[in-house]
Image (cartoon, rainbow, N blue to C red):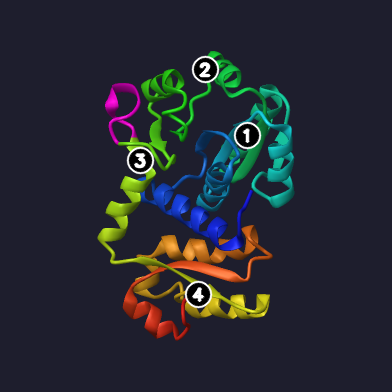
Amino acid sequence: MQQNAEDTQSRILRAFTVLSSVRADWAGALVLNAGLDPIGSAISLAANVAGAVSLTIEQDPAVVRNALRTGSCDFVVNTLDEALRAIKNEIRKHRPLSVGLEGDPPGVLAEIIDRGVAPELFTSPTAYPEAAAHFRSLGALLISFAEETNSSAGPDGQIETAAGILEAFLATRAWQMRTFSFSSAAEVRAFDARALLPPETEAASEDLLRRRWLLSAARILPRDRRRALWLTDEESLALGVEPA
């Protein structure tokens, strides 16, 4: 799934920030995606951090196996029936789950439409515009995470881009991504504890995005000795750690 640990973590944090900026609570929601490339894997993990259930369609068996091995998916299935049995239960319980479905995306999307499945978010709208138009008619958000997507792409020229959402969101906070490197897991945990505002403080109550990220990053990236985090220049200095 990853070219290197830093790139992977940055992708996940960016995707999670996009999800958090468009919807405060993803518990009980379905995120539908096609492709388990590095971006698709990041979306799957970001959706898990956000509390959503995600279903990602991938036709390459080797890519699906790698996604399971690296933790991008909690488990993988071969049929839509298997996937629906798993995701319906977790959606009902408002628990996060990441499912990879091995199959041909156009065919699986057609089956999803026939079965009346209605995702809250479809992240591959430019690659599959007909499916995107259908999901939008059911109320789904359409957000393209593809780097080359422009804002006028897709059905009715109304697809939002992850890059555009992220840029606008960060501009209001003066946040920049800082990545810190450590020599051990203990050092990473110590940094997370230092960066994590006490939950009873007013600042923490208004900063659920970064708190949730810090509380989840070690779980989804247990072997990573880096920590990517959105910070202002003043916050970076206050933490007393030089960015990598």
Mark toward the start of the polypeptide (1 vs 2): 1
- What secondary structure predominates along the stretch shown in magenta? loop
Name the element at disc 2.
helix
Residue at 71 percent of width and 23 percent of height: 79
Residue drawn at 55 percent across, 65 percent down? 215
Of labels 2 and 3, earlier in sequence is 2
Q: CA distance from mark 1 to mark 3?
A: 26 Å
Q: Which percent across, then down, holds residue 41?
A: 58, 45
Tell me the amino acid under the disc marked 1.
Ile
**Disc 1 to disc 4, C-alpha distance:** 38 Å
Q: Which dot, 1 or 2, sits closer to the camera?
A: 2
Q: Are marks 1 and 2 in contact (CB under 8 Å)?
A: no
Which residue is pictured at 26% across the width and 59% down the height?
171
Using residue 135 as the reference point, say whether residue 51 is left or right of it. right
Three-letter amino acid code of the residue under disc 2: Ile
The residue carrying mark 3 is 161
- Residue where numbered disc 1 is placed: 87
| Residue 222 drawn in magenta | no
Give the alpha-carbon distance from disc 4 to disc 2, as whole Å: 45 Å
Q: Which of the two labelled residues, at mark 1 and mark 4, occupies the earlier sequence position?
A: 1
Left/right placement of residue 227 relative to residue 149 reads right
Q: CA distance from mark 4 to mark 3?
A: 28 Å
Q: Quadrant of residue 209?
A: bottom left
Q: Amino acid at mark 4?
A: Ala
Task: Decide: few, some or many residues near mark 3? Use Cα within 10 Å; few <14, some 14-19, many ≥20.
Answer: many
Tag 1, which secondary structure?
Answer: helix
Q: Residues within 10 Å of mark 4 (few under 14, many from 20)?
A: few
Q: Position of residue 43 (x, y in %)?
A: 52, 45
* In magenta stretch: residue 154: yes
Disc number for residue 244: 4
Magenta region, residue range: 151-159
Can you tell which mark lies on residue 113? 2
